[in-house]
Image (cartoon, grey):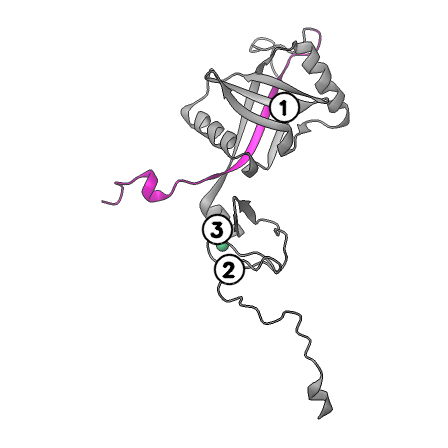
Amino acid sequence: MAASARPSPITRPGRQSADGLPGRSEGMTCGSCGRRTRIDRLPRGWKACGTQVYCPLCRRRRFRIRSITMVVAEPIRAEWEQFRLALEETWRRSAPLFLTAQAWQLTTVGGRHVARVFVGNQWWALRLDDSQWSGGRRAAYEKIAASQAATPEFLVFRRPTYEKGMRYRPSRELRPYEIACKAVAWLPREQPDQANPKVRS
Ligand SMILES: [Zn+2]
């Protein structure tokens, strides 16, 4: 029959797909369980980490979301007023201010924790108030600083505070508030046998 000669509607030429290797042009493969996506960009819930991508299930097994809020103690080599005014410009448009991965950086300078942020067309170095940080928070800071790409969210915002409890004062005229940065990051969970090597013995 002539009909059998009609080309079948196969859009994918013979391609090895059972090996679980990422077919770069045809979806992505979870680096842990091998589940595949149908599309080339990451579907909702999937996560890229370095050269691997993970499906939502494996992502939750391997990472946990951690958010740290860091109060700004003072701008370095700049007046509070300058930084505050630069921020006010952006706050008029949106509050809080979400920064892209290119517009912020967490560093440690001489043992102090310093956030660099690009606001109002220039970089600012902000000394963070780390006086009461726990060991866990310091460790999270280091991890976020080391792999900025895995931090999907970084923002600068105003936090109202009570006059009495206030230590840093961006402005003497305005109602009391502090300026804080917040990083929301996916951090690798420690593998159970690494975290507690003797638990099972
Ligand atoms: Zn998976």
Q: Is residue 39 left or right of residue 197?
A: right
Q: Is residue 67 above or below residue 108?
A: below
Q: Position of residue 165 (x, y in %)?
A: 55, 11
How many C-alpha atoms fall within 10 Å of the one at disc 3: few (<14), some, or many (≥20)? some
Dot 2 and dot 3 residues touching (CB under 8 Å): no
Give the residue number, with chain letter if any, for mark 3: 58
Which stretch did the figure color magenta? 173-201
Residue type indicated by callout 1: Val
- Left/right placement of residue 96 relative to residue 165 reads right
Q: Is residue 42 above or below residue 183?
A: below
Label 3 SS: helix
> What x and y, as percent, mark residue 17?
53, 66
Residues tagged 1 and 2 counted as in contact (Cβ below 8 A): no
Q: Disc 1 vs disc 3: which is toward the camera? A: 1
- Using a 10 Å C-alpha cutoff, classify the residue at mark 1 as few (fewer than 14 neighbours), some (14 to 19) or many (20 or more): many
Q: Is mark 3 within 8 Å of ligand 1?
A: yes
| Residue 117 tag number | 1
Query: Which kind of residue does numbered mark 2 sit on?
Result: Leu
Q: Which mark is residue 21?
A: 2
How many labels sit on residues?
Answer: 3
Q: CA distance from mark 1 to mark 3?
A: 32 Å
Q: Which amino acid, by three-letter code, is at mark 3?
A: Cys
- Residue 138 shown in magenta: no
Which tag, 2 or 3, sits closer to the chain's start?
2
Q: Quadrant of residue 115?
A: top right
